[in-house]
Image (cartoon, helix red, strand yellow):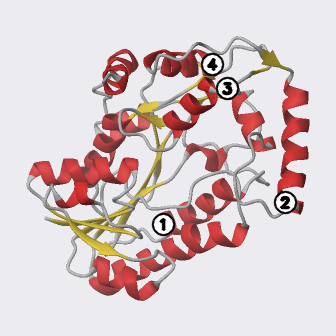
Amino acid sequence: MKALVTGGGGFLGGAIAAKLAARGDDVRSFSRGSHAELASLGVEHVRGDLADSEAVSRAVRDCEVVFHVGAKPGVWGPYADYFATNVTGTDNVITACHHEGVHKLIYTSTPSVVFGGSDQEGVDESASYPSRYETAYPETKAIAERKVLESNTPELATVALRPHLIWGPGDNHLVPRIVARGRAGKLRKIGRRPCLVDSVYIDNAADAHILAFEKLTPEAACAGKPYFISNGEPLPVFELINKILAAAGVPPVTRSIPVSLAVAVGWMMEKVYGAASIKEEPPMTRFLAHQLATSHWFDISAARRDLGYTPSVTIAEGLDRLKRSFEP
C-alpha cells in the first residue's frame, strides 16, 4: 500500500509514518521541513505547504490512502494563519484525494472541536459543536472536521479521530512545554477542583489511526464519523502534569491560583500581546485557563466497538518510557 501522511515530520505524523513503514507499506510524508529520521526509515518526503494546492496534489499522487495529520496547532496567532493551514489545507487534501482517486482519508481532529469552556465528563461523539470558540485552533479544526466527514462517499471513505493530549518520548509540543515551565517555576494549579482529563500515549494514538485505516470502507460503521481517542484512564489534570514533571526529574506543582484570576490574566495577556503584535504565545489565555480548570474526559466505547481500538500502553508504562527517555 502507498500511504501519504501529511505532517509526517510532527510527533503523531512521524509515529504513524514509522508504524506504516514497519508494516512494509510504501510511505510518503508531506510537510514544510525536511526530516532525516523519516528518510532513515525509507519514508519518501515531499516538501510543501498545505495551503498550496499544487504541492498537495503532488504529494497525494499515486497514493491509496491519506492520513491527514498536518495542522497548525496552538492557542495564539492570526485567525487567517490557522484558516489557511487547517481549513484551506484540508480542502486541498480532499480535492486532491478526489482528483487522484484516493479511496480512504483518515483525518486527525481534536476533542477541542466540541469544547465550549465547561466540564465534559464521559461525553461521547453525540456532543455538539459549541456556538462559539475562544481561539482559532479548535474553530478551524471543527470546520475542517465537518468538511472531511461531509466528504464521505462511496468513492472516498472518510473518518475523523480526536486524540486528546498526546504525549510520550519524542514529544516536541506538550511535554517540553510542561517541563520547561516546571523548571522555571511558572506552573500553577488553576482552581482547587480535581478536574479529570483524558490523555493518550503516542503509540496508542498512532495505533488508532492504523486501525481506522484497516476498518475504513464505504460500508464500514466508522465511515463518515468522528471518534474520541484516549488511554481511557482519566486523571486529575495536575496529577498528570506532576507525573510528567516527575519523569523529567522536576519538582511537582503545588501552588494554585483562582480560576477567575487565571481567566482575567489570560484576557489581559491576550490584549497586551495582540496590541503589541507579539507572535510568541502568551503564558496564559482564556482558552488555556478554561482547559486547565475543567474536566474533559471521553467515552471511547465507540472507538473500541467500530475500530477495535484498545490502548496497548498504559499511562504507568508510558510514564516509565518517558522517564527513561530523559535519562542520559
Identify the residue position indicated by label 1 in the image: 148
Quadrant in which the N terminus appears: bottom left
Find the distance from the CA under tag 3 to the CA under tag 2: 29 Å
Identify the residue position indicated by label 2 in the image: 274
Q: In which quarter of the image is residue 276?
A: bottom right
Tags 3 and 4 touching, CB below 8 Å: no
Nearer the observer: mark 4 or 2; the answer is 2
Find the distance from the CA under tag 3 to the CA under tag 1: 28 Å
* Type of amino acid at the residue the image marks with label 1: Val
Find the distance from the CA under tag 3 to the CA under tag 4: 11 Å
Q: Which disc is residue 238 wearing?
A: 4
**Residue 249's x, y, as percent?**
47, 16
Query: 311 or 122: which is nearer to us?
Result: 311
Question: Element type at marker 1?
Answer: helix
Residue at the spot 51% in from the left edge and 36% down from the top edge: 176
Tags 4 and 2 touching, CB below 8 Å: no
Residue at the spot 57% in from the left edge and 54% down from the top edge: 73
For marks 1 and 2, the one nearer the N-term is 1
Which residue occupies the extreme front position in the image? 328
For marks 3 and 4, the one nearer the N-term is 4
